[in-house]
Image (cartoon, rainbow, N blue to C red):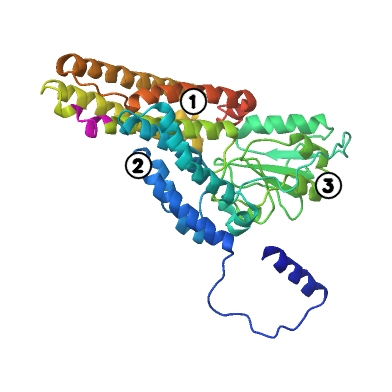
Amino acid sequence: SYKAGLTELFSQLEKPIQEEHLAPESGFKMPWQIWGTIVLSVIVALISLGTFWTIFIPFVLIPLPYQIFKRSFDFMRVQAALAALPIALAMGEFVYVENTELIDSLTYGFGLGFLAWVLLAVLRSAPLQRWGKPESTVPKFANPYNPNIMNPEPVPFFIDYAPQDSKIADEMSTMLKKYGHPQADSIQSAKAVMALISRFKNNTEADPVKQVVFPVMIQMNNDLAPKLSKVQWIDFRPGVKGLNRLSQLLPNPTALLKALGMRPVSSLSVYPPMITALIYFIILIAVINVGAVIDYLFFTGVTGILDEESVPLLLGVMAGSVFLFAVLSFFMVRSLISRTGLFSNIKTFIVGFIIQGVLVFGIRAFDNFIYDILLDEAGVDLGYTFTYLGTWVYVIGLAVLAIVYFRNRLDIKRWFPSTQK
């Protein structure tokens, strides 16, 4: 076991003992917790097939058992898929099964999908966190605490940043000056240099050999300069937090890194809470509405009931809506993740967000139009479709976003690139 192994290691360090047997040269051993997790993930993967219309959930969960075995999976994506699985199961049951009450659908979805939340709890447990590679673990501060140093020794600092990250740099500079640290006139004269790393900057003129350099990760950059990749960095990808601790511990780099330094998290998809909420909201709305149109065209049988003149109109409107919704959602998410592109500007992003809402309610309105035609002319009642649920998910999602925004509103200001020149 892990504890027994640590005990043996410490005893060997204190008093080395000659082993009687050679170390094995082949084969491997896995803790029973890992085997159990793999079995559970197989069951959850099979359950996820019931949410095929989402595309995203089975795409993430079906390869998960093998990825757990290989110790490599994107924890944040898996967490989102597992959290959404019960909801997707309930929605699918409500739409696809005739004469199903809402309470029965919720009981089915959350009863069966509960295993997904169990798996999520297991993946967050200590044995699985030790097992996974950095990208498969939960990012967290190594040793968060409040040093409560109100008058630290002044340290001349310099913040090296790209113009697009000026909002974060200004916020850091304000906090450092508040605790009495003077801003150096040049990067060479500073005793402490904070290099803000993002898509827009991957290097610094500061010399880590001659100066104390703190790489501050704002956004993942796979082309990080070699001299910075060898230095422990402060990870602000989950959000710019702890600036007061940074200011209080700046004279003591060792204590600073213990308080704010984060274990390496490789290419793990980590974003501030508000940005994460926006990304998954856009993906969820896109999945539901694209899935709704696909279900409407191919599984409800509506094309076989309408007259020949109405079918081309139905196909044209629905296909156009799917295409526009998918393209819009793709570029909005890509701009959010990369902080570049058309929707990397807050104003154009809001416009895209509004267009999404118009499409959601437009698809619902067209669904009502076709529903009335079928009911009046053919006496066919389609019942509930995914378009009916899409509007509710959109409204509820906006309410959840409002709550997240209230607690993390500064994420928006910091994340969207500054347009200052």
Upstream in sequence: badge 3 or badge 1: 3
Q: In this view, does 85 lie to the left or right of 291?
A: right
Rendering coords of residue 119 (x, y %) = 53, 48
Whether residue 71 can be seen here: no
User: What residue type is disc 2 on?
Assistant: Phe
The boundaries of the magenta stretch are 296-302
Rendering coords of residue 294 (x, y %) = 28, 33
Question: Of 139 and 386, which appears nearest the observer?
Answer: 386
User: Which residue is under mark 3?
Assistant: 252
Q: Distance between the residues labelled 3 and 2?
A: 53 Å
User: Which residue is under mark 1?
Assistant: 397
Upstream in sequence: badge 3 or badge 2: 2
Q: Is mark 1 on a helix, strand or loop?
A: helix
Rendering coords of residue 418 (x, y %) = 57, 28
Q: Is residue 342 left or right of residue 4?
A: left
Q: How far apart are marks 2 and 1 (CA)?
A: 21 Å
| Res 21 → quadrant | bottom right
User: What residue type is disc 1 on?
Assistant: Gly
User: What residue type is disc 3 on?
Assistant: Asn
